[in-house]
Image (cartoon, rainbow, N blue to C red):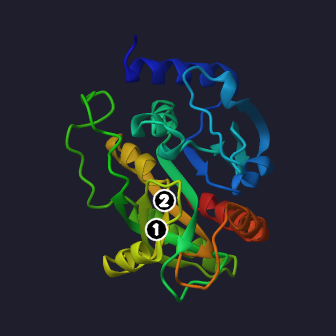
């Protein structure tokens, strides 16, 4: 069987044949946040099922399509939906779409997610720029033989989330009159939500928000030298913060409520890249 690099190249070539002008920026759109892909102009839509070797999400709120189109006079690729480790995928497979974007020549990756709020100053629907992450997934997408065509064996993770892009996000928010927060994102494997004791632990070690994604893609992107910006939509307060149960339906309801704000922020950020 071909190796990971060869499978990535096959998928990248399939996209090259379909989309014409190649994007320099890609966005991975998390649970309930995929509507941004539908706003792109001059768009080419490719269902994930049509792309060789591409993993398909089974989670409600992840549409499962790649949209290459234009926004703010720039060509971008929007990945509406992602796969997760909790669906049974190895972390290398979770990072596969990121690898493909890198081989297409993407130099900036905006990775988004729906997250639970640990920092009690956050309200439901808040948008948080990720300053750093804590990987508690129990693995790493770079485990195994390293292919130097992707990147070095031991990539530096001092600045996973680009200072330049974080400044651009702050400027974009200010220009649109939006309020955004900053914080540290913790990634756990799921699919069960965290217990109150786990949330207390995460708060002690410095996490402001928690979710089940983003970190594998960010690591793989940095391995390939891609600049990363991370954005979390705080869709609910994490377990134990409020006296109420957690549900995926509530997550999707909150992302629907912030749809306009989220799209406006992404458009303003892309204008500044």
Residue 197 shows up from this direction: yes
Q: Which residue is more in the foreground, 123 or 21?
A: 123
Label 1 sits on residue: 130
Between the residue at mark 1 and the residue at mark 2, the CA separation in whole angstroms equals 7 Å
Classify residue 174 by image quadrant: bottom right
- Please give left or right for residue 212 compared with residue 162 in the image: right
Q: Residue furthest bottom?
A: 121
Q: Which mark is residue 229?
A: 2
* Marks 1 & 2, CB-CB < 8 Å contact: yes
Mark 2, Cα crowd under 10 Å, few <14 / some 14-19 / many 20+, is many
Q: Nearer the viewer, mark 1 or mark 2?
A: 1
Q: Position of residue 235 (x, y in %)?
A: 64, 71
Residue at x 37% of width, y 18% of height: 3
Residue 199 sits above or below residue 98 on the image: below
Residue 260 sits above or below residue 229 on the image: below
- Please give left or right for residue 19 compared with residue 167 in the image: right
- Please give left or right for residue 244 compared with residue 167 in the image: right
């Amino acid at each position: 069987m071909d190796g990971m690099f060869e499978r990535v190249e096959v998928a990248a070539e399939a996209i090259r044949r379909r989309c014409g002008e190649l994007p320099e920026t890609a966005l991975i759109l998390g649970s309930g946040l995929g509507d941004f892909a539908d706003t792109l102009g001059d768009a080419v839509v490719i269902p994930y099922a049509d792309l060789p070797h591409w993993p398909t999400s089974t989670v409600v709120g992840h549409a499962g399509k790649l949209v290459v189109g234009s926004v703010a006079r720039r060509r971008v690729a929007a990945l509406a939906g992602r796969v997760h480790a909790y669906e049974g995928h190895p972390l290398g497979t979770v990072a596969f779409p990121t690898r493909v974007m890198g081989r297409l020549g993407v130099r900036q990756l905006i990775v988004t997610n729906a997250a639970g709020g640990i920092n009690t100053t956050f309200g439901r629907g808040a948008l948080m720029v990720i300053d750093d992450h804590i990987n508690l997934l129990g693995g790493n997408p770079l485990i195994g033989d390293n292919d130097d065509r992707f990147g070095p064996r031991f990539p530096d993770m001092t600045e996973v989330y680009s200072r330049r892009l974080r400044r651009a996000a702050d400027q974009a928010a200010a220009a649109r009159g939006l309020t955004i927060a900053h914080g540290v994102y913790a990634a756990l494997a799921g699919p069960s939500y965290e217990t109150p004791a786990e949330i207390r632990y995460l708060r002690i070690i410095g996490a402001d928000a928690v979710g089940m994604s983003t970190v594998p893609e960010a690591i793989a992107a940095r391995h390939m030298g891609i600049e990363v910006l991370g954005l979390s939509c705080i869709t609910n307060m994490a377990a134990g913060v409020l006296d109420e149960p957690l549900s995926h339906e509530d997550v999707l309801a909150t992302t629907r409520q912030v749809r306009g704000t989220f799209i406006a922020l992404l458009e303003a950020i892309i204008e500044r890249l």
